[in-house]
Amino acid sequence: MTYIPSADDLEVITREVWTSFLDGDPAGLLVSGDDVAVERVTGCVHLSGAYTGSIMLSCSGSAARDAAAALFSMQPGDVTQNEIIDAIGELANMVGGNVKSMLPGPSVLSLPAVVQGQLAVPGAHVVREVHLTWRNEPLAVSLWQQAAQAA
Amino acid sequence: MVIDDSSAMRLILGRIMRGLGFDVVEAPNGAEAIARLESGAMPEIALVDWNMPVMDGLAFVNAVRKEERWRQITLMMVTTESEQSQIVRALAAGAHEYVIKPFTPDAIADKLALLGVLAY
């Protein structure tokens, strides 16, 4: 039977990444039932192979700016759009790579893509999702699976 | 040498390495890292991401290990690529160590000490 990481797994992985590179505080991320705000930034990595799908990290524009500021050790007001793209891409890459390690392999991880707004993958659907808040801003991590692979 | 397509990650790793007493040069992919080596850079150690555009980390490791003149460079993968089969591939290609992101500064220092490039 194929193990699909749980929402708790997504939370633990995200918390580890956030603790290592952003806050140093495991309590900095809180579980929330809320969906991500309309104005959002989404980072995504795709998997192809034994498991085909995507891992997305989506957060408010304000959270994205704060995350970039923390990664680059800058003031949020000084962060450029390129730095936000770089930061959200790398965070999605780290979360995605660690989720990949829990999925059936072998599979290949894509380079991260970052978009302003929401992203949907044609032919795929969300199989796991966790909603969090960081600095009172919404953040969500979701695992997608191509429909052809779905049970 | 820090080789990673993320400028944030290059900044973080560069800061850690400078804090440990290393001079740091950076490259955003394997091809630019090779160009720096070709132009005379001879790092004691290269921290190498796996997933990068242009030339990925595994291709970089293969390219470095083919050249006798670069044989003394210690290669450490620092990557999110954590499948066991991928780790084995990197080590078989000639990487000396493997660190999975996310990491702590202590984890990097511990690996460097294990490799003998950092005195503890």
Image (tube, coloured by chain):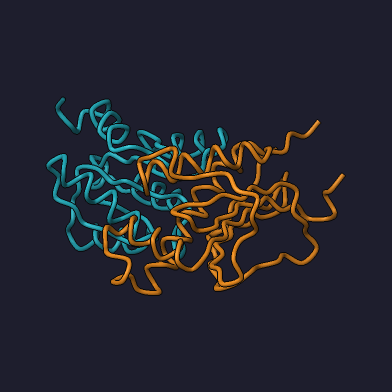
Chain colours: A orange, B cyan
In the depicted structure, whether residue B107 falls above or below residue A57: above
Residue A145 at x, y = what percent?
Answer: 75, 52
Residue A125 at x, y = what percent?
Answer: 78, 57
Left or right of residue B95, residue A38 in this image:
right
Give the number of callouts: 0
Pick the residue in front: B71 or B116. Answer: B116
Residue A4 at x, y = what percent?
Answer: 72, 38
Pick the residue in front: B113 or A34. Answer: A34
Left or right of residue B82, residue B100 in this image:
left
Seen at 23% across and 40% down, the residue is B72
Seen at 63% across and 57% down, the residue is A46
| Quarter that holds the C terminus of chain B | top left
In the depicted structure, whether residue B94 falls above or below residue A117: above
Left or right of residue A134, residue B29 in this image:
left
Pick the residue in front: A12 or A30. Answer: A30
Seen at 59% across and 38% down, the residue is A101
Seen at 39% across and 52% down, the residue is B60
Residue B81 at x, y = what percent?
Answer: 51, 43
Pick the residue in front: A43 or B60. Answer: A43
